[in-house]
Image (spheres, rainbow, N blue to C red):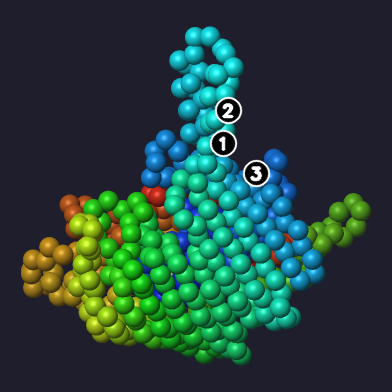
Amino acid sequence: MANLRTAMDAAFWDLDISSPQTLHGAARAVPGEPFPLEGARASRALRVQQLSFLGNGFPLGVIPSFAPTSQKDMGSFSLQSLFFRPATSNWWLGLIGQFRPTKLISSIKANISTVDEWELSTFKEVAKHFIDKSLFSFGLCSQLSLTPSSSLMVSTEKHGDKKGCRNRVMLFHQLLLKEGSSTIHVHLQLPFHDITLEAAWPELFINHEGRYWEVPESISFDLSSLVSESGLRYRFGIHKNGGDPQPVNAINGETPSALMPGLCAKAAFSYEKSRDFWRQREKRKDSIVKTEQGPLWRPSYDIALSEPHGAISGIIGGFCEAWFGGLRGHNDGSSADAKTRNPFGADLFASACCTFQHGRFRKRYGDLTRVDARLNICSASALAKRVSNLLSSTANDENDPLSSPRLNLVFQQQVAGPIVFRVDSKFLLDSSGGIGGPHLEDFTYSLNYSLRLLQSGKVVAWYSPKRKEGMVELRLFEF
């Protein structure tokens, strides 16, 4: 079943999107924008933990990734590795290293092509390229368990091709898998509630077009309830942005108003429900396979995909927000100006999903085909305004990205054994811009290797053609 919580989480500032632009492997989604792809949400495991596990299955423990940089000669290809991770019963330390070989190879080729005769000075010139600091990035992360229910995490990362460091200090209680850059994080888990206090500087955000923005200072407090048996859930948050957001790869783009300086108080609620059309419940005898050596227990590769079924689910909710502190213009002459931000706002959102799955994902071939179709209405007010303009034939040059519904499709097909091919796509149900009918807005494709021993864990290698990014992740219990 699709993660319906995304509908509410997309309105706040802590929705992590997988991204190789940082060494901790995630960037925050810009709040108040269209819901992201189902497979775009970042892993719940820390990047250090992922690399520690993935290093056992890759040659020399080196994991590849693709991430475009502002410097074209740096290339997009990079290699990551966990150098060491000493640990005791209540403490561990991890050092992540990243290397970009494209610039090194091109620089050496340029030197060699102009050499007529090899001399000692030639070797010295070639050797200098290996110590170019722009080729390397390092991240240090440490966690100390203060009590059985609280821990302190400290991390810092430095990219050789950029100025400054991204530092992070996190103090949390109970279980916490949230990340940020330069973050002080306090997390308290109360019965049926999560309370989070977080400060980050700078914070990296990504919008629905795949453009990155860096906010110098981001502070937030959130209280979120767990989904009750009745399906009700609520959330309250206070967030403060400090400093003018800087575009990382946005050219002549409009700065999202949610990232501009100011203090925002936001409250949201939702009600979700699901119902099965049909479902073949898994029984213990289904996991027993008769062999020549006797009965053998063979469970599904992923317990979340062990029951063939057809189901429908939906969520509906609303939020209200109040901003304190207005927008201020850019002093650097930047063309990226933000829209006028309303001091008060309220809206409704809704999402409906249909799921059909064939197979129990237990056999080696042809035992899993799954399709999820999810219709998202991100803003009821924007949609109503658009419909009103169409009915009254009112011309409106301003195109609100929230005014059009979107259809998210997820297709999963078993290739062989635990390997599954997956495609996540998002269609914009809009006929404007000279394009008739729905058109593809974004998509990613991935290969998933399910790990039966982890019950619901998998190694995911994904690539986004729109963002021209890709990476390998370890994802756990994503259902």
Q: For the residues labelled 3 and 1, say whether their Cβ atoms are less than 8 Å apart.
A: no
- Looking at the rendered structure, the secondary structure element under dot 1 is loop
Residue identified by numbered label 1? 131
Q: Is residue 378 above or below residue 67?
A: below
Residue 278 vs residue 109, the one in the foreground: 109
Residue identified by numbered label 3? 62
Q: For the residues labelled 3 and 2, say whether their Cβ atoms are less than 8 Å apart.
A: no
Amino acid marked by disc 3: Val
Residue 73 vs residue 195, the one in the foreground: 73
Q: In the figure, is residue 83 to the left or right of 39?
A: right
- Looking at the rendered structure, the secondary structure element under dot 3 is strand
Q: Residue at x 33, y 68 (%)?
A: 243
Q: Which mark is residue 127?
A: 2
Q: Seen from this angle, which residue lies furthest front?
A: 121
Residue 45 vs residue 217, the one in the foreground: 217
Amino acid marked by disc 2: Ala
Name the spot of residue 70 as percent of width and height, x first.
38, 45
- In space, the residues marked 3 and 2 are separated at their CA atoms by 23 Å
Name the spot of residue 164 as percent of width and height, x first.
46, 56
- Looking at the rendered structure, the secondary structure element under dot 2 is helix
Q: Is residue 345 above or below residue 327?
A: below
Of the residues under marks 3 and 2, which one precedes in the sequence?
3
Residue 84 vs residue 425, the one in the foreground: 84
- In space, the residues marked 3 and 1 are separated at their CA atoms by 19 Å
Instruction: Determine crowd level at label 2: few under 14, some 14-19, many 20+ residues with C-alpha closer than 10 A.
Output: few
Q: For the residues labelled 1 and 2, say whether their Cβ atoms are less than 8 Å apart.
A: yes
Q: Is residue 158 visible?
A: yes
Of the residues under marks 3 and 1, which one precedes in the sequence?
3
